[in-house]
Image (tube, grey):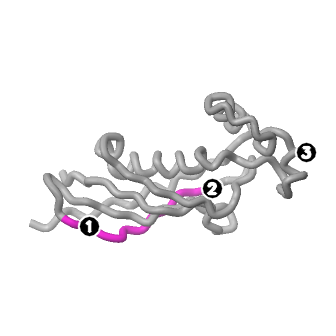
Amino acid sequence: MNPSPLPAFPALRRRFSQDMVNRYGRVNDDRNLIHYEAAAAQRAGFARPVVHGALVAALLSEACRDFFGRPWLEQGRLRVAFIRPVLVEQAVQTGAAVVSERPEGPGRRVELDVWCQNEAGDRVVAGQASCLYADG
């Protein structure tokens, strides 16, 4: 029996506000001012404050959860590299391409190349995701 075709990977889009960055910074106790103050970001060479890389990577994890379902929460794997900074109020969108599928247990192991790209189409985060995909 052939497995069913995989669904499209969710193209989640998010524009990170300063409030989102501030709230994340309070939770993780990041005090680097380039995330909060325009002047500090400008001194570091950025036009606006910089979004925490983990917030951008979390958007990829959210898309993987939507794609794989509950198995993602239990045994999904995500490995990413940060390619370029995302600035506050800059929108990014998730994307993925299937690298491989192989039978495993009650379903199949699916390996993906995953990324977030900015509005110019430049990848800002890229990596690999892997999880068991349960057919049916």
Q: Do the residues labelled 3 and 1 touch (CB within 8 Å)?
A: no
Marked residue nearer the N-terminal end (3 or 2): 3
Left or right, 103 with respect to 23, comes to left
What percent of the width, then of the height, locates residue 29?
67, 31
Residue tagged 3: 39
Q: Residue 92 carries which label?
A: 2
Q: What residue type is labelled 1?
A: Glu
- Residue range in magenta is 92-102
Q: What residue type is labelled 2?
A: Val
Q: Distance between the residues labelled 3 and 2?
A: 23 Å
Give the residue drawn at x 84%, y 49%: 41
Q: What residue type is labelled 3?
A: Ala
Marked residue nearer the N-terminal end (1 or 2): 2
Badge 2 crowding class, 10 Å Cα cut-off, few under 14, some 14 to 19, many 20 or more, is: many
Marked residue nearer the N-terminal end (3 or 1): 3
Quarter where residue 107 is shown: bottom left
Q: Secondary structure beneath disc 3?
A: helix
Quarter where residue 17 is shown: top right
Magenta span: chief secondary structure = strand
Badge 3 crowding class, 10 Å Cα cut-off, few under 14, some 14 to 19, many 20 or more, is: some
Question: Which residue ends up furthest to the bottom in the rendered image?
Answer: 99
Residue tagged 1: 101
